[in-house]
Image (spheres, rainbow, N blue to C red):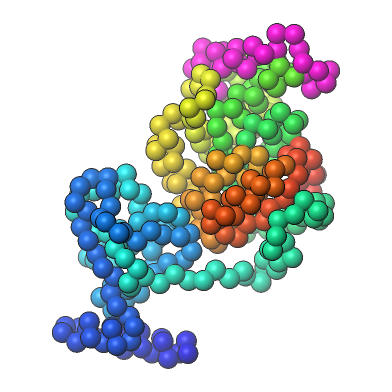
Amino acid sequence: MVKRRNLALAKCQKVRGIGEVFLLKKMGMQNVNLTKAAKDGVFPDFYYTTTNLETYIRLNCRLIKVENIEMDKGIKVNPLRKSAGCICGNLVKKGDLIVVGEAGVKVEEFKDKKEKVFFGFMGSEISSERNKDFLIRRVAWMMKKIKKQGGKILFVGGPAIVHTGGGRYLAEIIKKGFVDILFAGNALAVHDLEEQFFGTSLGFEFKKGDFTVGGNHHHLWTINLVRKHGSIGNFLKAEKIKKGIMYECLRKKINFVLAGSIRDDGPLPEVITDTQEAQYRMRRLVQDNRVKMAIMCATTLHSIAAGNLLSAEVEKVVVDINQAMITKLADRGTTNTVGIVTDTEPFLKELSKNLN
């Protein structure tokens, strides 16, 4: 069947002129329908919306791969260059040729590769009753393999990482060279810096195991101090802080994107308050074909945002104490995902230990 289809494609590619459309229809290989965008920032009506699966379009008797595939976008076509790529609605320009309808679009069914077999027994339902130690060891094994092969690892994290005492373990993982990109919000960075400066997280002192009197001011004072110094790096240098998540990110020159939120205090100078700009920077970082794995820990919205940007081929590990959060991510269409229902601190502690 595959051989016959390849022969048909080869024959089709030799056809030009009047008989082309007839032959395409006869073989079930209709060309895509293209419509020009009527104005900036607006797709044509009924444009084709993408998945994160490998996608091809049929244009002038040729199958063209859609580059930089990601979820819930459109497809922009350049007939002269014989190329196609995903595009966001806000980036559409008047006159762009956009794929409309499903005719001429071919989506490859996702199939696990042999090297992913160890995740197979987790591929059905998400359960809190899985062997966490085994899962974490396998995640560490995959991380080592990816780094050995020259791949990159994305880490997406929420502030609960610091609140639960897992910040130092994430810092260790970054220090060991197993994180290449970090996506987070204002809160993760703020509470990490608060912990390094005041020894608290939202006023809770880890050494004493209790809330500090007046500790509710600490995260706000931390933000103010960083803004006073002009940047996270200047703050760390001025206050002679040489530990923590943000310190290791800057020391190891890790690319990070801190995306703003409507509820942010401050925010820190590095936080991008324009959500479209933050999404653009995140997209640029994950479009690197070397990103092979994403670990999403204790953050719903950032995990969904990152999941939408990643192709189906990228390994995804989602860690959260709330099972419903992991299910929600899967329901949003994020494929190739392993869910681990557990608190962040023991997960990161065990992961760091297995990465030694």
Q: Residue furthest top?
A: 214
Q: Which residues are magenta?
A: 205-232
- Image-quadrant location for residue 95: bottom left
- Image-quadrant location for residue 171: top right
Q: Which residue occupies 55% across, 40% down?
A: 301
Q: Is 149 within the magenta?
A: no
Answer whether residue 260 is visible to the viewer in this image: yes
Q: Is 234 placed left or right of 82 in the picture?
A: right
Counting from the top left corner in percent of width and height, residue 123 is at 68, 63
Q: Is 335 placed left or right of 10 in the picture?
A: right
Q: Is 18 placed left or right of 109 in the picture?
A: left
Counting from the top left corner in percent of width and height, residue 354 is at 79, 48
Q: Is 215 within the magenta?
A: yes
Q: Nearer the viewer, residue 316 or 71?
A: 71
In the displayed structure, 119 sits above or below 288; it is below
The total number of labels drawn is 0
In the displayed structure, 207 sits above or below 73; it is above
Counting from the top left corner in percent of width and height, residue 175 is at 68, 38
Q: Which residue occupies 39% across, 54% down?
A: 73
Q: Which residue occupies 38% across, 90% down?
A: 7
Q: Nearer the viewer, residue 57 or 144?
A: 57
In the displayed structure, 335 sits above or below 295; it is below
Q: Which residue occupies 56% across, 36% down?
A: 184
- Image-quadrant location for residue 169: top right
Q: Nearer the viewer, residue 60 or 172?
A: 60
Answer whether residue 172 is visible to the viewer in this image: no
Q: Is 192 placed left or right of 311 in the picture?
A: right
Counting from the top left corner in percent of width and height, residue 148 is at 66, 56
